[in-house]
Image (cartoon, rainbow, N blue to C red):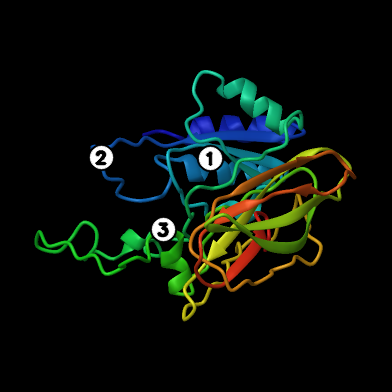
Amino acid sequence: MKVVAPIATAVHAARRARVGVVFASDWNSEGYDRPTLALPGAADALISAVAAANRRTIVVLNTGGPVLMPWLSKVAAVLEAWYPGEQDGAATLAVLTGQVDPSGRLPVTFPLTDVQSPGGDPSSWPGVKSDVSFRSGLDIGYRYYDARGLRPLFPFGYGLSYTTFRLGSTTVRRAGSADAVGVSVTNTGRRGGVEVVEAYLGFRRQRASRLASSRPSRASRWAPDRRDTSSSTCHGALSRATSKAGGAPSPAPTPFRSGAPLEIFPSGST
């Protein structure tokens, strides 16, 4: 496949532009196993070349899952837009121009490499001599990385905002047959925005720490975050809090059932 001419054209345009925007996509299917998490074709080469020509390059990913990003340190920002449908252009434009605060958070972990992912072991995928071995037990998804002390490219739940937030003290109260965990969220920035508060629970004998991203946040710097621990545990949900710039704290209660240590994190914490 000849890609030299198209890349050269993109580089020429990037040198004359204030901001370079590169759209990259992949193709997924329920009946198709991806041989690698790398972007297909010459996508990585295109992004690297445009980023070298314009340091203010933004990458918009239209992918169905995690992808590798060997060019991450060379670009100004990455927007994971998934498979957005017919309103792709309007939605992407609204986020890139700041009309809408990006409030989505990653529902999956983005590994650093193919082999770092749970499916990186040939014995578990695609199998050896028609035998497939699953050794992860309950450590699936983000728990796989946490249990092995692995730092992924971006952890489950990661996401940035155009403003900054501060988490207040955590409260735990009885709510019927469950425990309700609450935390105040204060917008400390200059514009309105949306934050997702995440609560992670673990067994008493297991490390319940949250894995941080390998790349510090540029868009939002956090004040020292409160990582309060409670003796209650089991499972929890993500809570969303919306507030105006400089506004009063917005309570973000989350229902829980009894269990073990609890930790509260801002979604963009590093």
Determine the secondary structure under disc 3. loop
* Sequence-first disc among 2 and 3: 2
Q: What residue type is labelled 2?
A: Tyr
Quadrant containing the C terminus in the rendered view: bottom right
Q: In this view, does 90 lie above or below 62?
A: above
Q: Position of residue 25 (x, y in %)?
A: 46, 35
Q: Do the residues labelled 2 and 3 touch (CB within 8 Å)?
A: no
Report the amino acid beneath label 1: Leu
Splitting the image into 4 quarters, where does residue 144 fall?
bottom left
Along the viewing direction, whichever of 207 and 180 lies nearer the viewer? 180
Extreme-front residue of the structure: 176
Q: In which quarter of the image is residue 263?
A: bottom right
Residue situated furthest bottom in the rendering: 205
| Disc on the earlier residue, 3 or 1 | 1
Q: Which residue sits at x=30%, y=67%?
A: 137
Mark 2 or 1, closer to the camera: 2
Mark nearest the camera among 3 and 1 is 3
Q: Residue 211 in the image: x percent, y percent?
A: 56, 66
From the viewer's perspective, tell me whether residue 162 is left or right of residue 246.
left
| Circles 3, 1 touching at the beta carbon (< 8 Å) | no
According to the picture, the residue beneath numbered tag 2 turns out to be 32
Query: For the N terminus, which image quadrant?
Result: top left
Q: Note whether 134 is above or below 90 in the view shown.
A: below
Residue 141's mark?
A: 3
Kindly identify which numbered label has been placed on residue 37: none
Q: Can residue 205 be seen in this view?
A: yes
Location of residue 56 in the rendering, given as x and y in whole percent from the top left corner: 73, 42
Q: Which residue is drawn at 63% across and 25% down?
A: 91
